[in-house]
Amino acid sequence: MKKWYYNPVLASSLKTRMRGWRTAASVTAYLGVMLFIAYIFFKIYIEAQAINGISVNANQSVGLQVYLTLAIIQFALILLITPAQTAGVVSSEREMQTLDLLLCTKMSSAAIIMGKLLSSLGFILLLIIASIPLFSLVLLFGGIALEDIAILFLFYIVTAFGVGSIGVFYSTLFKRTVVSTVVTYVTIFFLGIVSVVLGTYMMAMHYSQPSQPADYYIPFILYINPGVGLADLLSTQAGGQYVLPYGIIGLLIGQVGNIPQGWFQQLPFWVKNIGVISIIATLLLVISTWSIRPNKRMGARIWKVRRSG
Amino acid sequence: MLIIRDLVKRYGNFTAVDHLNMHVQRGQIFGFIGPNGAGKTTTMKIIATLLAPTSGQVMVDGVELQKDPIKIREKIGYMPDFFGVYDNLKVMEYLDFYGSAYGIEYRQRRRIAEDLLELVDLRDKKDAYVDTLSRGMKQRLCLARCLIHNPELLILDEPASGMDPRARAEIKGILKELKRMGKTILISSHILAELSEICDCVGIIDRGRMVVQGSVDHIVRRMEGEAVVRLKVLRDVDRAVKLLKEQPMVTGIVQEEQFLEVTCKGNDEELWKLLRTLVNSEIPVISFNKAEGNLEHIFMEVTSDEEMVL
């Protein structure tokens, strides 16, 4: 009997991806870079502490600073690696001329897309999990709780899912992997940099009105930027001592916050951020599924048959 | 097994398949012949549920394509005109992957894969990476792949293209074995001589329309209407030529030393009478061969003519 959770594309991709020395070497290199950076920053912070004099909370402060540094570096690496992993999943099938063969099988387009996405994210997940011991070192210094690390990793997974779905979407849209990869990186750049600039400008314009509005205003464009969500999450975890309630944006425009109204607005920004990213990612995957469907005019019928079957 | 009625496929103003009608009986090998761009691959892709027809009806084993494409996918095995192999998989893993994509249980698909590797003579390569296989081996592996779910109808688009004569002969042998196993095969190829050897029926398509279809012998007989006999005489060539010219069924003679190529109307009975006349006249005939129908000649002829229904 066919198991509902078994995805042939995922199983096969994981098998081929994880065998050989390349994956092990990639994970080792990744952890090596992370460890090296953590060590450098640790030394810098320790030196700074020595210059400024030892305080009671010195250890906690160093631990927190190393944690924030690692969190930001890991986030940047996820943004850098995920497009490369996902932007060719469907286009490479086209290039190898295997997509038609897959579509001829009993697998649905949705199962093919999910299998491709999850197999690519599997590698990212491996990197994230492999870095847990590195992050756990921070616990020795105090200042960060275990659940903070767990929440941060959840945020990473959602970010990887969001960025991965952008890669998958473009790989279904473009026939060539090179084009798909470039467009995915351009989109990530837009999300990362342009959205912050635009969002900051919109917020600044809003709050600089002569009437001095006291509402809770964050432009939608900032909700789709996982970087802003991370800033908010880290500021929350750091107890607000490094960034303001509005995160980086608040810091940039000098807005220290109005009291949010309504349940949605009272949710932490990073929660809304991962919510919006998840919804957009799901939509992109639905469109991707539709676009690889071999016989779009028969699509409705296939759906009907599957449901009744 | 396969019925196609009034199939039309248009891309904008271009009509790739134009009111195509086709009928393939269960257990037949049907040769699908046509020049490049005639609509063979489009038709095959429609049957394989990869393209939606603009209009018309396709039925596979009583199941209508437009109504239940999933069921159709269970019934067909599609082999496109390219390899489509994952180079980073081993031969056994490749078949196992497609077996799982068809929802076949692990042990069963391993067993089927072993049997198929035996059929396509790749058993000793089961642990080899696909990218290490020769072109002919990859082609045989692709054939094994499209058999993994035990389909009733095989759609093979140019399965022997770009292969050397030995590899083509191997594919031909496998196809004959599949026919013996009761599979229905729709095969397109440019190598017409080979098609005429293995096919029960052929259909010639040109500019999206089926120009002629039927059994090879039937088509050749109906198209040519004349038989060609090659004979060799030991001596008295001039007398033989004179005698042949007197026969009403003979329409042409080409002489080359002791060899004569005689074109004549009529069936095998008439040919026997011709031979008897020569022998009774004491012409020393030492060989008398009826030339087999030339599918290639007919292909060239019909793809430039109007539609012809036989």
Image (cartoon, helix red, strand yellow):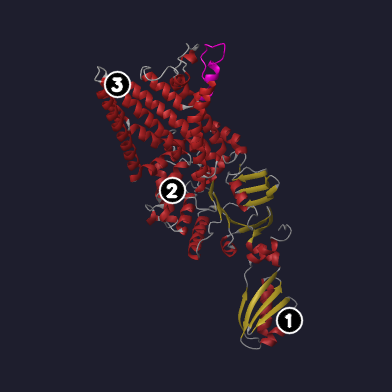
Q: Secondary structure at mark 1?
A: helix
Regarding residue B274, the answer to whether it shows in the image is yes
> Between marks 2 and 1, how big is the CA–CA gap?
63 Å
Q: Which residue is mark 2?
A: B95
> Between marks 1 and 3, how big is the CA–CA gap?
114 Å
Q: Amino acid at mark 1?
A: Lys
Q: Is residue A98 above or below residue B168?
A: above
- First reached walking from the N terminus: tag 2 or tag 1: 2
What residue do we see at 37% from left, 52% from top? B127
Q: Which residue is mark 3?
A: A61
Q: Nearer the viewer, mark 2 or mark 3?
A: 3
Q: Nearer the viewer, residue A92 or A304?
A: A92
Q: Chain of mark 1?
A: B
Residue range (magenta): A203-221
- Residue A285 horizontal/vertical position (percent): 51, 33
Q: Which residue is mark 1?
A: B245
> Between marks 2 and 3, how big is the CA–CA gap?
57 Å
Q: Amino acid at mark 3?
A: Ser
Alpha-carbon neighbours of circle 2 within 10 Å: few (<14), some, or many (≥20)? many
Q: Nearer the viewer, mark 1 or mark 3?
A: 3
Q: Quadrant of residue B199?
A: bottom right
On whether disc 2 and disc 3 are found on a single subunit, the reply is no
- Residue A229 horizontal/vertical position (percent): 44, 24
Magenta-span inclusion, residue A49: no
Q: Chain of mark 3?
A: A
- Residue B101 horizontal/vertical position (percent): 47, 42
